[in-house]
């Protein structure tokens, strides 16, 4: 198939980071963009479906970080939820540790559960202190062994309880969390953001710059730009490309880069894990579980860690729904994804009968999302180890030639969160805009000061990746000085970037400079 006309930017993926990148580009005047989305809807891991007569969010479901954080900032997703009048429900996890059912169906005494919880938290904090002091090969200070200890370890480590370590989301925005319980779904936010720059009609996006069901197969890049080929044989050309695919997809072989991405970049993709977080929904003819204050979340203590451990009734979010939700993670998610829904229902019902007795009604419906086996997601969110530093994040979001990367995995502070994806899209778009401005100034300054003719096919790079000699370096630095002497209108911001580009002592390739922008 013949290639389509060249545009300025192609965005791979229409999750919230890709949509925000497109919005920022459009608002700064870069409107000739194309967004390629592999599925038939936008939103990415913010996804909803119908279940039990309701709309439920099978992906991201909470707005985390609400209240008065130390940073004095308001979570931008909370702002948007309020702007669009999304219905939310406050999630109070504080009693979950005291609603632990043992394998006899009894609730563990509050004092016993509290003591075990405090022991685990204190041990985890000691480990963090030892690591922060520079100790190597820190031995675990708490090794869970009993079903109760395993359940507590699970909620502390798999659910990022803020007691264990300071998490920027909670310290900067606040510690409260709100579950989205709106018939329009959490992804309604993404829909509204997209409609601000993509043409829509009756609430539906009809803009041909958004192309759904376009699975990107290959991204070929060179100095002149990128050529993207889809599985259907469509070809798209652009000067820049933003890849907003999840880190799980980047770890897979779904998208081929030609030439292959540099080894340093590929290695970064595998320096962290992709967590799989599976919310299993069960619909019953009537409720049989406690629904009073402090009962929304409850745990099942099993000798196998994470075996149908974390439960939530949805009566607070959806009164009268008669729906229970159990969350499994990682290896249990993968195990459950690989088996039939009938087996999963039987396992979940067996656990519920242990907790509430054999006379409970049979579930009428079950919904099991499969994020790990979804080739366009390959997991739920990024989980970076403690040793990852600022340089790692600078490198993982650093462009490779005309290819830029965005998504929650590129956010140093807020990786793993919706607001992290949202903010990363803004950052990446601004990086491209800055690069475009710098290249425009480069051409203008070269033409003004040195008589060089602008070359349209060389506008993708601000400078060559190598220089032949120190003389050439000094010559380019002289260009900057000459521009100042000639009183060309240069802002301090852009002059600083030129100094970084052309200083012989601080010279980096264009890619490395962009990674430090």
Image (tube, rainbow, N blue to C red):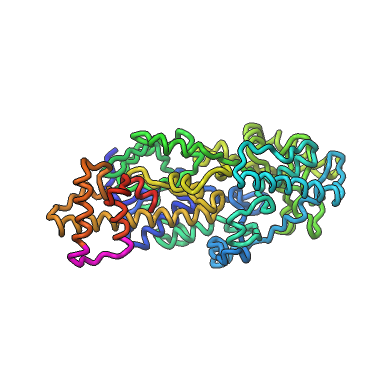
The quarter of the picture where the N terminus appears is top left
In the rendered structure, the answer to whether residue 197 lies left or right of residue 307 reads: left
Residue 433's x, y, as percent? 34, 57
Residue at x 36% of width, y 43% of height: 400
Residue at x 43% of width, y 56% of height: 427
Note whether residue 82 is visible. Answer: yes
Vertical placement of residue 341 versus 85, above or below: above
- How many badges with numbers are in the image? 0
Q: Give the magenta range.
A: 484-494
In reply to whether residue 250 is colored magenta, the answer given is no
Q: 107 or 141, which is in the foreground?
A: 141
Q: 363 or 83, which is in the foreground?
A: 83
Residue 50's x, y, as percent? 61, 50
In reply to whether residue 491 is colored magenta, the answer given is yes
Residue at x 23% of width, y 48% of height: 473
Q: 338 or 418, which is in the foreground?
A: 418
Residue 478's x, y, as percent? 20, 55
Note whether residue 37 is visible. Answer: no
Residue at x 49% of width, y 57% of height: 191
In the rendered structure, the answer to whether residue 176 lies left or right of residue 187 reads: right
Q: Residue furthest left?
A: 451
Residue 92's x, y, as percent? 72, 58
In the rendered structure, the answer to whether residue 254 lies left or right of residue 327 reads: left
Vertical placement of residue 254 versus 470, above or below: above
């Amino acid at each position: 198939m013949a290639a389509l006309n060249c545009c300025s930017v192609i965005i791979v993926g229409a999750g919230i980071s890709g949509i925000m990148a497109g919005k920022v580009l459009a608002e700064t005047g870069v409107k000739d963009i194309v967004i390629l989305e592999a599925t038939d809807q936008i939103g990415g891991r913010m996804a909803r479906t119908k279940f039990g007569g309701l709309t439920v969010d099978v992906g991201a479901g909470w707005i985390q970080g609400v209240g008065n954080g130390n940073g004095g900032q308001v979570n931008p997703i909370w702002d948007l939820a309020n702007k669009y009048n999304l219905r939310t429900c406050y999630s109070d996890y504080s009693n979950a540790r005291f609603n632990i059912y043992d394998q006899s169906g009894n609730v563990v005494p509050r004092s016993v559960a509290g003591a075990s919880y405090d022991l685990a938290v204190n041990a985890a904090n000691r480990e963090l202190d030892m690591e922060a002091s520079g100790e190597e090969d820190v031995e675990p200070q708490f090794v869970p062994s009993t079903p109760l200890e395993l359940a507590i370890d699970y909620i502390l480590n798999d659910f990022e309880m803020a007691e264990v370590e300071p998490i920027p989301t909670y310290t900067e925005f606040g510690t409260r969390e709100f579950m989205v319980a709106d018939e329009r779904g959490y992804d309604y936010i993404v829909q509204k953001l997209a409609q601000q720059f993509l043409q829509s009609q009756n609430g539906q996006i009809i803009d041909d710059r958004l192309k759904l069901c376009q699975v990107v197969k290959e991204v070929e890049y060179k100095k002149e730009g990128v050529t993207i080929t889809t599985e259907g044989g469509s070809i798209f050309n652009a000067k820049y490309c933003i890849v907003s695919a999840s880190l799980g997809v980047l770890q897979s072989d779904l998208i081929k880069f030609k030439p292959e991405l540099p080894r340093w970049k590929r290695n970064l993709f595998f320096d962290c894990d992709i967590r799989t977080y599976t919310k299993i929904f069960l619909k019953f003819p009537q409720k049989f579980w406690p629904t009073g204050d402090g009962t929304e979340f409850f745990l099942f203590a099993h000798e196998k860690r994470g075996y149908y451990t974390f439960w939530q009734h949805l009566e607070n979010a959806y009164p009268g729904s008669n729906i229970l939700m159990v969350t499994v993670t990682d290896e249990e998610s993968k195990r459950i994804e690989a088996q039939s829904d009938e087996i999963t229902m039987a396992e979940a019902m067996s656990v519920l009968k242990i907790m509430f007795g054999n006379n409970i009604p049979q579930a009428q419906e079950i919904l099991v999302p499969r994020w790990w086996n979804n080739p366009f997601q390959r997991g739920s969110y990024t989980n970076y180890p403690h040793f990852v530093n600022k340089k790692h994040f600078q490198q993982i979001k650093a462009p490779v030639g005309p290819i830029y990367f965005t998504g929650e995995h590129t956010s140093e502070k807020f990786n793993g969160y919706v607001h992290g994806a949202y903010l990363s899209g803004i950052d990446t778009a601004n990086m491209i805009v800055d690069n475009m401005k710098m290249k425009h100034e480069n051409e203008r300054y070269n033409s003004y000061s040195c008589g060089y003719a602008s070359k349209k096919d060389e506008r993708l790079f601000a400078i060559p990746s190598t220089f032949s000699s120190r003389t050439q370096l000094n010559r380019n630095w002289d260009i900057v000085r000459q521009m100042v002497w000639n009183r060309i209108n240069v802002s301090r911001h852009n002059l600083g970037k030129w100094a970084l580009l052309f200083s012989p002592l601080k010279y980096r390739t264009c890619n490395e400079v962009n990674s430090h922008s």
